[in-house]
Image (cartoon, rainbow, N blue to C red):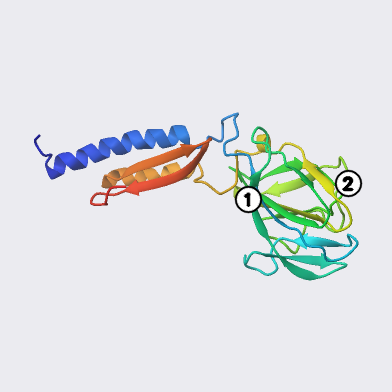
Amino acid sequence: MARLTASENRRCQAVLGVFALVAVVVLLPSVASAETMGDHLWNVRENHEGFFDNNDSWVRPWRSSTEDGWGEFQGGHSGYFQWTPMGTTGNPLDGSLSLNRGIDTQFDAWTYLYVPMATTVSLTGDGDCVPRWFLNYQFDSPLDSPHEFVVGDPTDISLSAGWNRLDITGYSQDAGFLFTTDALASQVSIMNTSPVPEPSTICALASLLATGGVVFLVRHRHAVSRLWILLPGSPSI
């Protein structure tokens, strides 16, 4: 079989790049689409230690300004505890959350939300577990502070354009609890357990065509989970 010359190889790579860019446009979330992209799930971690006999505190997801796997009680009681990762949970159809837990359980559930422009979403929580909401790592300023959720009373969440992280924490040291939220996914463009490439990535990828770069994506349950960019001379995957 005849080998391609260097110029022919570059032209082939450019053609493949065009097809790859078309795939990007099709596969990446469209802000005009009626279907919210992403897995619609929540990351969850928990602690199952008994510390006191009442619920006079609230749970801070991180004990400091950096993530080290520890949470913190604030309010009536104080103290640190270590989180145990529990995987992901939630309703993949609408992004709602439901946690049915026993006594002496602390939890932190978080997800990532993408919106193309600043907007306000509404979320209602229900559960006797001193829940708190935190947006974009503002762990010293719960969105509902200084009050707990009122059953059936929605909380307005002002999202910035681009990616936002939403955390919900709760705990109960005197009884088990069931904590639930209503649907969230339909109010945003992407809801995912990690911040995947956003639609604006398409513009950045377009510039790669001039260099003969080829873009490969692996799509998993509506979310782009892998993104490879091969430039001329790069080793094969």
Residue receiving disc 1? 164
Q: On the rendered structure, is 212 left or right of 162? A: left
Picture quadrant where residue 3 is located: top left
Does residue 219 lie above or below 227 as drawn? Answer: above
Judge the density around disc 2: few (<14), some (14-19), many (≥20) Cα neighbours within 10 Å. few
Q: Secondary structure at mark 2?
A: loop
Residue 98 screen position, x and y as percent:
75, 41
Kind of residue at badge 2: Val
Residue receiving disc 2? 150
Picture quadrant where residue 23 is located: top left
Residue 165 screen position, x and y as percent:
64, 52
> Closer to the camera, 45 or 17?
45
> Closer to the camera, 204 or 217?
217
| Residue appearing at x 71%, y 48% in the figure | 158
**Image quadrant for the N terminus?**
top left
In the displayed image of the protein, which residue is found farthest to the top? 34
Judge the density around disc 1: few (<14), some (14-19), many (≥20) Cα neighbours within 10 Å. some
Give the number of the mark in front: 1 or 2: 2
Q: On the rendered structure, is 199 left or right of 186? A: left
In terms of sequence position, does the residue under pointer 1 or pointer 2 come before the other?
A: 2
Kind of residue at badge 1: Asn
Q: On the rendered structure, is 128 left or right of 109? A: right
Residue 15 screen position, x and y as percent:
26, 35
The residues bearing labels 1 and 2 have C-alpha atoms spaced at a distance of 24 Å
| Residue appearing at x 78%, y 70% in the figure | 79
Assess whether mark 2 and mark 1 are in contact (beta carbons under 8 angstroms): no
Residue 212 screen position, x and y as percent:
26, 44
Does residue 74 lie above or below 224 as drawn? Answer: below
Q: Secondary structure at mark 1?
A: strand
Q: Which mark is residue 94?
A: none
